[in-house]
Image (cartoon, rainbow, N blue to C red):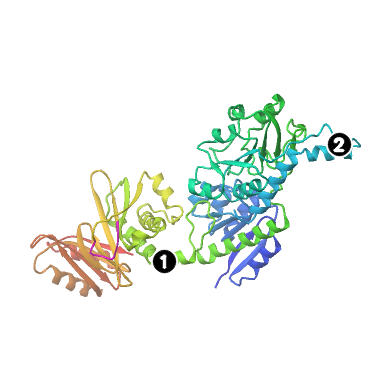
Amino acid sequence: MAKHKILVADSISEKGIEDLKNDPQLEVDVKFGLSEDELIAIADQYSGIIVRSATKITAPVIAAATQLKAIGRAGVGVDNIDIPAATQHGVIVMNTPAGNTISTAEHAFSLMTSMARTIPQAHASMVAGRWDRKKYEGVELYKKTLAVLGMGRIGGEFAKRALSFGMRVVAYDPYLAASQAKIMRVELCESIEEAVAQADFITMHMPKTPETTHMINADRIALMKDGVRIVNCARGGLIDEAALLAGIESGKIAGAALDVYETEPPEADGALLKCDKIVFTPHLGASTQEAQENVGIEIARTVRDAVLNGTVVNSINTPNIDEKTIEEIGPYLDLAEVLGKLISHISPQQPDFFRINYNGKVSDVDTTLITRSALKGYLSLSSGATTVNTLNAPSFAENRGIRVTESRIPAACEFTDLIEVEVGNENESTAVAGTFFGSQPRIVKIRDRNVEATPEGHLLMLENLDSPGVVGHVGATLAKHGVNIASMSLSRNQVGGRALSVLNLDHAPSEELLADLEAHEGIHEAQSIDL
């Protein structure tokens, strides 16, 4: 069996690399310092790529990596990875948000204490031969108000340390519940403005997004107390550095401590590095032996599991799914994909909605991936998009103007589980549904007809008159062409009306066979569907 190849493109801990090399299913290449062109030239060899912050995984690299399943970032920030391109190509992007939590929180807290007591400036003064005791008077942390912007893992650890120093902690985080804030002993603010307006110290622990870029700007600085001190050990660009310098020069801001910058490294002769009221470190938040080993091991195992088992944790662009979840919803994923394939053959052209309805036990699980599996099945045939998968299916649908929704139907149902997929537009729609008989999946609805068909192999679907002789013609015609019937389901809307016949066949019917079937006056349409 061919091995999956993993590229380690940036330095990670040796233990992480050893972990990968010890897996007999993997072949590992360690190549640092590759340019974009060099990456493009070799990208199609790899199922997984691991980077830190140096190597950039751009859209052209991702497009060239035709076998790529996962990109792992040994660290938190993923600015060096083109997330939209990865999503479009169905590539999972994962990071290690927990591996450097303690390291980064400790570093940020150290920056705050160093800034409060002007320790770096005092040290430089001593080394220069001066004894400036009066010049470097600091402030205490005790009883001061700290604003934590972002109460994730790192922000939470920072808050714990601040509370132990006797600080009052207020926090802004749009995803933090009030009950959790109470447990963490922090006061939750409704806005950034509310948090920074009452703070003596401010620390940021948010990702860089369009919404958070320059979250500390001239307008918000104007709301702050005189003499406020600011720490950024999260991402460069959260602070507008020009506004920060203006605030320091005006006396509004007493000091700052920075580990990250809008441009890294910052200009050596720029105004920022010349400011003696700022404490600087060169992006050292995760730079401890323990953190580097932790993130190296964690990202190696994360990429390995994604490539080999389909297990997804700490994903940036897709729902997480572990082995237990796969075991729980696996059968639903397969059934939903088949229903998506089936409806792609019979649904109206130019659809504007794709709706999936859940009834029964399946309503109690996280259905995100089930919906995506159905969408994948539908789009893989209806759009001719051979690269569509559960990761990029929503973006394919969005690009085609298809609105995807899901619902849970509380009404009584004759089945323990039921998954119904409906596709259509404002003028017409079509639905199919499936369930399980015991552990066996079944198609139980096509259009508005109740049927029973096995959701695999070759299906023959007939629209025919409910009249004597039709079934005999079907059987005789299939026999004439040497095609055996595995099972057959008949459904009619009324006696003598129009019937729907669904047959599971042992072999795919030929075009000649279909033409022979349709030659009968009672058969309106004969359609072959491969599932």
Identify the amino acid type marked 2: Ser
Whether the magenta-drawn stretch holds residue 416 is answered as yes
Q: Residues within 10 Å of mark 1 (few under 14, many from 20)?
A: few
The relative height of residue 145 versus residue 475 in the rendered view (above or below) is above
Whether the magenta-drawn stretch holds residue 199 is answered as no
- Residue depicted at 40% across the width and 45% down the height: 398
| Quadrant in which residue 276 is drawn | top right
- Residue depicted at 33% across the width and 63% down the height: 361
**In the image, is 376 to the left or to the right of 316?**
left
Q: Which residue is mark 2?
A: 125
295 or 461, which lies in front?
295
Magenta extent? 413-420
In the displayed orientation, state which residue is furthest to the right.
129
SS class, disc 2: helix
Instruction: For the C terminus, give its image quadrant.
Output: bottom left
Q: Which residue is mark 1?
A: 328
